[in-house]
Image (cartoon, helix red, strand yellow):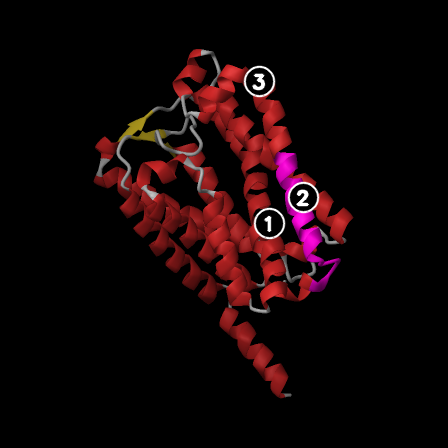
Amino acid sequence: MFEKALIGKNNIWKYILVLFLVFVCTQVISGVLLFSTLGNEGIVALSNGNYEFLYAQGFSKNLIYALFLSPFVGGFFAFLGLIKWIQKKSFTSISTGASKFRWKRFMFGFDIWAVLWLCVFGLGLLAAPEDYTFQFDLQKFAILALISILFLPLQTGLEELLFRGYLLQGFQLLTKSKIASVLITSVLFALLHLANPEVEAFGFWLSMGTYLSLGLLFGLLTLKDDGLELAWGIHCANNLLVALLVSHKDAAFQTDALTLATNVEPVEGLISIVIMAIITYFACHKLLGWNKKKEAKETLAEV
């Protein structure tokens, strides 16, 4: 994938222009949707985290959730259009080193993270069932599932294409170092989530540690596997399972999930993420034959 970084027009000002226009696009979509749906008072309440006011006005969690995700959907398609128009880059050129996007890799990442996440979630339920309140409502949950399945692949896709594709390639061209590019984009990915309510609730370092751990995992997998398919699959699985199965009062997305966590331990959460990330990395290393690929390249170089 890094070899494809040279494809298209790579002037720094064009990178800045694309990022600026994507930001404007998402903000315009967000502003129009929020203002037309919630009105001035609703936007103020939302910005202050006063969800109870919104619920009292008849706005459902599912509606607010969809409003939050909609700008990412618009941004996803705007981003792909802008890089093609301004820089002559394609979806494939920024997403994979292969000739086409590897959906099997995407599903591999999705499946392995889903299994690990469900194991951790199940252990949490068994260890402290009193910390979870079941709130299953078939109608609300069905709508939540539909919104999540339609929107979250695009929401996570936009973030992965930006950070593990577009910016990873861009910083590699700038720094001439793949490792530096992974580190820079991982830090930027963490800082992107700085406004999330978890940061205020759990503290800067714990929250940033979680996002940075995920960013480093995604970046390293992209580097080793020559494509972001694994990272996108993992990111999608993580957000989908969180949205559907567990919510808490300080979550970025307030959803009608299967359970409501009444006691969240951020330290345990960070430790779990780090352990899951390590297991995922070595599982991919073993099961996807990265060592064999390296040995094959070395053999060809010797011929």
Residue at mark 3:
37
N-term-proximal mark, 2 vs 3: 3
Determine the residue positioned at 72% across, 52% down: 90
Query: Residue 196 appears in which quarter of the rendering?
Result: top left
Task: Specify the label residue 79 is tagged with.
Answer: 2
Which of 271/14 is in front?
14
Query: Could you tell me residue 279's position as x and y percent?
Result: 38, 59
Is 282 on the left or on the right of 298, as rendered? left
Magenta range: 6-26
Counting residues from the start of the chain, the first of labels 3 and 1 encountered is: 3
Residue 2 position (above or below residue 17): below
Q: Which callout, 1 or 2, points at the residue further toward the start of the chain? A: 2
| Spatial separation of the CA atoms under disc 2 and disc 3 | 25 Å
| 28 and 151: which is toward the camera | 28
Do the residues under discs 1 and 2 have CB atoms within 8 angstroms? yes
In the image, residue 103 sits, relative to residue 244, either above or below, namely: below
Residue at 56%, 73% (x, y): give it: 293
Numbered disc 2: secondary structure: helix
- Per the image, label 1 sits on a secondary structure element best described as helix
Among the 4 quarters of the image, the one containing residue 243? top left
Picture disc at residue 162: 1
Residue 23's spot in the image, x, y percent? 62, 39
Question: Which amino acid type is marked by label 3?
Answer: Thr
Q: Is residue 135 left or right of residue 244?
A: left
What is the x, y in percent for residue 24? Answer: 64, 36
> Are the residues at dot 3 and dot 1 in contact (C-beta closer than 8 Å)?
no
Q: In the image, what residue occupies the spot 66% across and 50% down?
A: 16
Q: Is residue 124 above or below residue 289?
A: above
Seen at 25% across and 33% down, the residue is 131
